[in-house]
Amino acid sequence: MEQMARMALPLNMNLLRPGDRVCVAVSGGADSTALLVALAEQSVALGIGLSAAHLHHGIRGEEADGDLLFLQELCSRFGLPLHVEHADVPAAAKAAAEGLEEAARNARLRMFDWLLAAGTATAVATAHTEDDQAETVLMKLIRGAWTEGLGGIAPVLERTPGRVVRPLLGATRQQVVAFLQQRQMGWREDSTNQSSAYTRNRVRSQLMPLLREFNPSVAATLSATAQLAREEDARWQPEIARLLGQLALSGKPVRGGGRAVATAPGEHSIGFELERLRQLDVPTRRRLLRAAAERLGSRLSSAETLRILLLAGLAPADCAPDPTVPSKPNSRIDLPGGLRAERSVRELRLLSR
């Protein structure tokens, strides 16, 4: 009987360059196992060096130890180096007052940065799939994301020491499982993936199946939406950077002309002439304010940005007034993250404290 042809995963090879030292971030789950195996099979043809990296989160005890043992055996089978980092993610989450998922993500990024900065890798590859992309877009949408948030998981994440690439974004979880089953390859199941305590798990197990009843290709549709959002945001970025350079005013105006530098320790500010902001359309005003806040080290939500526009008297004409926001000169509002917005007769000023 003729041997069945081996199926290939739809990897985005444009993200990998000949001569790259690619380190695959592996958890032991189906997605990262499939990515590692697929790249191992094609590494010679691609002209890349290959290794793997695993973060032991310190969360699941013996189960996590079993993941590490599985990965050690897998990498030994393919003759690949495995870099292992241990972290106490629960303790880090408590110390930083952040969620467990966020703390784990930050720990992974620190590991990626170390691998890139040390020259161990010129690119770190993560195994995010089309399903992950769809789930991310839904979670961002539910929470009220801006365009860049709806862009979801970018194919390339530029970090200071190098880049993180996602070559598996075009593959579905179904394709991943079929790929491994054809090769009779096992993988590890993370028991926390069954917990309803995590938003992503509820989106995956409850919301996505419901949406597939309306559109069986909803994951592909959401992934396409993410690509459009990333392209739209990329189009805006140089324009907003140009306007910020032209319109942003540092310091505070003083009598007799000129501007004074802030004297409070750690205080920085960016101001705008109200009349010049008034000449811009509302979408541009919103993006400009958000860019200014980011320069000051803060991120504005859509609701917070609207409050600033209301304060400045620059909100959309059909926007309902907010009784908690003053809309006259010499007023101010405090925002999360130590950000304050102040309005004078002629200016709107953002301050970080």
Image (cartoon, grey):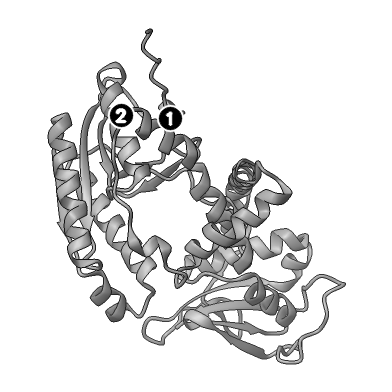
Q: Does residue 306 appear left or right of residue 140 in this picture?
A: right
Left/right of residue 309 with respect to residue 113 in the rendered view: right
Which residue occupies 19% across, 67% down? 61
Residue, disc 2: 39
Residue 211 lies, in percent from the top left, at: 67, 54
Q: Is residue 297 left or right of residue 124?
A: right
Judged from this view, the residue extending furthest toward the top is: 2
Residue at the spot x=27%, y=48% of the render? 28
Amino acid type, label 1: Leu
Depth order, front residue of 35/325: 35
Residue, disc 1: 11
Q: How far separated are the C-alphas under marks 1 and 2?
A: 9 Å
The residue type indicated by label 2 comes to Leu
Looking at the figure, which quarter contains the C terminus? bottom left
Q: Nearer the viewer, residue 314 or 116?
A: 116
Q: Is residue 291 above or below residue 212?
A: below
Name the spot of residue 319 as percent of width and height, x first.
82, 75
Outermost front residue: 1
Tell me, yes or no, if residue 314 can be seen here.
Answer: yes
